Image (cartoon, helix red, strand yellow):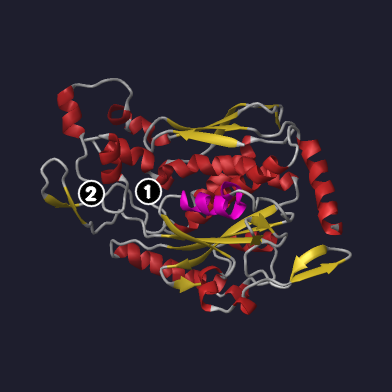
Amino acid sequence: MRYLTAGESHGPQLTAIIEGLPALMPLTAETINKELKRRQGGHGRGRRMQIEKDTVEIVSGVRHGKTLGSPVALVVKNDDWKHWTNIMGIEEIDDADEVKRQISRPRPGHADLNGGIKYGHRDLRNVLERSSARETTVRVAVGAVAKQLLAELGIKIVSHVTEIGGIKVNPESYLGKSADEIREIVENDAVYCADPTATKKMTDLIDETKKNGDSIGGTVEVIVEGMPPGIGSYVHYDRKLDAKIAGAIMSINAFKGVEFGIGFEMARRPGSEVHDEILWDENNGYSRKTNNLGGFEGGMTTGMPIIVRGVMKPIPTLYKPLQSIDIETKEPFQASIERSDSCAVPAASIVAEHVVAWEIANALMEQFDADQLPRLKENLQNYLQYSKEF
């Protein structure tokens, strides 16, 4: 499978085209809209989330509630477009007006300066409109389609916030809980946290940070249950599934690090405390005594839950702006404010969940005959039985 997104933050709409979905898969706009609403939630979001009420329109590839096997096109309209038609319009404008509206002051931490250098844009709005995290709206929509496919195959996925601004959850609070149980907690939590005792501290810190005109980042975790072993590849570097998932996490705006299982803690432990011993029983087949490696060995799934975490830096646009340089005058200035989230870590956890869902679904489609959903299900069940008896 593959997909392409298009659209600017304050343009008329965001668009995605998905190619390679199996035919006969149930899909409705309602399924996608539920996930889009989750992305817009979480304590610490700014005014833009009050303006946009993101809903998707499926404009091709689905008939009477089921996919056709042809490309699926998704559209999310930007409600704020009506206020930006002059600034973001497609038609040519008078040169004097264009110069007057140009943004020549890059914001530290954003793509403004580097993107301007790369594409030759003297007006940095040409960069910031596309590099905006607004683009993750339609990536969540795409991931929601992938999650629907995973649900049909009995694979469950959930995300949650594990740290905000140095306040960490206690892993013991959700140890042993299933993906469904974690989801039930998270969907009723202000910061999408599976440890309710940490929530109040996190929300208080977010409020204090906003009051101080600053921003904070954090860490999110994605858990995938039900994946069979051997999905991915040890043969080719670019087919290792953990590498693809790591790349997907790092492709999310403001993410700067990724780890699986106990992650960087492995650097501080001997091998005897890291590697997962192999078990077997007649009912379940192969399993692992622990899951320190987060469900992967050799670029392939082990059959244990996939556990991946990503770290999000603080949002770089601040109410107490940092210093930068005007690209026209080369004079120093205080960077402008373009958005107002003080913390978007909860929303980012939803984005992470959906980009991981896409990579998981894509890997299954690559490994099994998948032109139609019933055949994909049958092939997966046969493989599960085979791997248990191997």
Q: What element carries label 2?
A: loop
Q: Which amino acid does label 1 sit on?
A: Arg
- Foreground: 233 or 347? 233
Residue at image point 68% right, 41% down: 366
Residue at image point 74% right, 54% down: 228
Residue 301, percent from left and from top = 68, 57
Residue 304, percent from left and from top = 71, 62
Residue position for label 2: 336
Density class for disc 1 (Cα within 10 Å; few <14, some 14-19, many ≥20) is: few
Q: Which amino acid does label 2 sit on?
A: Ser
Residue 56, percent from left and from top = 55, 35
Is residue 190 something one can see in this rendering?
no
Q: In this view, does 252 lie above or below 199?
A: above
- Foreground: 268 or 112? 268
Residue at image point 46% right, 50% down: 252
Residue position for label 1: 47
Density class for disc 2 (Cα within 10 Å; few <14, some 14-19, many ≥20) is: some
Quadrant position of residue 229: bottom right
Q: In this view, does 170 lie above or below 154?
A: below
Prevailing SS of the magenta stretch = helix
Q: What stretch is highlighted in magenta?
A: 237-251
Q: Is residue 313 above or below residue 85?
A: below
Is residue 45 something one can see in this rendering?
yes
The Cα atoms of the two marked residues, 1 and 2, are separated by 17 Å
Residue at image point 79% right, 46% down: 380
